[in-house]
């Protein structure tokens, strides 16, 4: 899907001008309400009694204010906007949590660009952004909920379907399904989706066949594989090894407190060693984008 195709498709929808106009009004009103909530939350931080350190302030800004540079670059590419326009507003942030520097953009600056669009492009931009943002932040969750509600309210769900039904390459996930790793599994899925791919977790797949043939089928059709070795499950070693035999790229991850137990033969391979789910999400998304590339088809 691209903007030109989107315009062609929506032009044939019934009462589309009225619906897009109402979609825009609803979205603008609720985004403005989000900015009000953001200002109130920021005011609480700046109270004399709120002695926040740099890490706490960084967490607040990640929750409320910033879009990652990958999100912004993908949005600008989808819309046909010049990425160089951002040079005047981008800032280098120092992460006290990850101990590195990186570029970030505030959603407010990107929003000023979005609201200059006509109604069709505005709708497309919000839906593209809806699929790019990280839903577990206040900002990402608000963008998703505001967009989805407006689409439903004004009978524009078909627009979301036009975008979401686009086939995405799948990514097989090999990992333990222990209760303690359920949250990690969700974060792995989120990072894969954020990079533009479709995650496959076998315990979530509906099927009526023996499990092993289904696993082999999903690995064969996957673009690459993510294998988490936390818990040292034999099945993960089998699935990762089978993937390697098929010349698939296998991104290996393991929780820090379990890494010393990784088999000697595979421990020589570069692993993403993670400490918590947020750390896992950020490191895995970065690895996918840098070594596989972001799937730009939204």
Image (cartoon, helix red, strand yellow):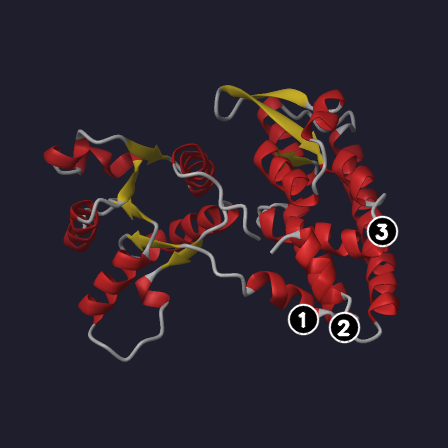
| 13 displayed left or right of 60 | right
Residue 159 found in image quarter? bottom right
Does residue 13 appear left or right of residue 237 in this picture? right
Q: Position of residue 99 (x, y in %)?
A: 48, 20
In space, the residues marked 1 and 3 are separated at their CA atoms by: 19 Å
Q: Are marks 1 and 2 in contact (CB under 8 Å)?
A: yes
Locate residue 200, reporting x and y percent: 37, 59
Identify the residue position indicated by label 3 in the image.
Answer: 118
Does dot 2 land on a helix, a strand or a loop? loop
| C-alpha gap between disc 1 and disc 2 | 9 Å
Residue 38 visible in this rendered orientation of the protein: yes
Q: Earlier in the sequence, mark 2 or mark 3?
A: 2
Along the polypeptide, which appears first: circle 1 or circle 3?
A: 3
Q: Nearest the camera: 234 or 97?
A: 234
Judge the density around disc 2: few (<14), some (14-19), many (≥20) Cα neighbours within 10 Å. Answer: few
Q: Which residue is mark 1?
A: 158
Answer few, some or many: residues within 10 Å of disc 3's Cα (few below 14, many 20 plus, some between 14 and 19): few
Please state which of residues 121 and 108 is positioned toward the viewer in this rendering.
Answer: 121
Proximity of marks 1 and 3: CB atoms separated by less than 8 Å: no
Mark 3 residue element: loop
* Residue 177 visible in the picture: no
Which residue is identified by label 2? 13
Q: Quadrant of residue 291?
A: top left
Q: Residue at x 78, y 37 (%)?
A: 108
Which numbered circle lies on residue 195?
none
- Mark 1 element type: helix
Q: Position of residue 130 (x, y in %)?
A: 65, 53
Category of crowding for the residue at label 1, using alpha-carbon neighbours closer than 10 angstroms: few (below 14), some (14–19), many (at least 20): few
What is the x, y in percent for residue 238? 15, 52
Q: Give me the residue at 78% from left, 52% from top.
A: 122
């Amino acid at each position: 899907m691209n903007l030109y195709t989107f315009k062609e498709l929506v032009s044939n929808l019934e009462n589309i001008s009225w619906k897009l106009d109402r979609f825009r009004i609803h979205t603008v009103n609720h985004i403005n309400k989000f900015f009000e909530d953001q200002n109130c939350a920021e005011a609480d931080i700046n109270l004399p009694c709120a002695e926040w350190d740099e890490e706490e302030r960084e967490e607040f800004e990640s929750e409320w204010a910033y879009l990652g540079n990958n999100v912004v670059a993908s949005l600008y590419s989808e819309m046909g906007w010049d990425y160089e326009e951002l040079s005047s507003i981008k800032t280098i942030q120092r992460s006290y949590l990850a101990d590195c520097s990186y570029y970030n953009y505030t959603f407010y600056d990107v929003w000023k660009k979005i609201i200059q669009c006509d109604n069709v492009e505005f709708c497309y931009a919000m839906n593209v952004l809806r699929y790019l943002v990280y839903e577990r932040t206040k900002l990402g969750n608000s963008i998703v909920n505001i967009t989805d509600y407006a689409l439903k309210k004004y009978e524009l769900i078909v627009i979301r379907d036009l975008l979401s039904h686009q086939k995405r390459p799948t990514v097989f996930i090999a990992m333990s399904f222990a209760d303690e790793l359920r949250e990690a599994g969700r974060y792995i899925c989120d990072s894969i989706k954020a990079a533009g791919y479709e995650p496959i977790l076998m315990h979530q797949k509906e099927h009526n066949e023996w499990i092993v043939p289904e696993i082999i089928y999903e690995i064969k059709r996957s673009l690459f594989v993510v294998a988490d070795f936390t818990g040292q499950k034999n099945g993960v070693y089998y699935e990762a090894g089978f993937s390697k035999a098929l010349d698939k790229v296998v991104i290996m991850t393991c929780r820090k407190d379990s890494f010393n137990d990784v088999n000697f033969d595979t421990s020589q391979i570069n692993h993403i060693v993670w400490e918590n789910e947020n750390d896992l999400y950020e490191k895995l998304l970065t690895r996918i984008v840098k070594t596989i590339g972001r799937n730009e088809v939204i």
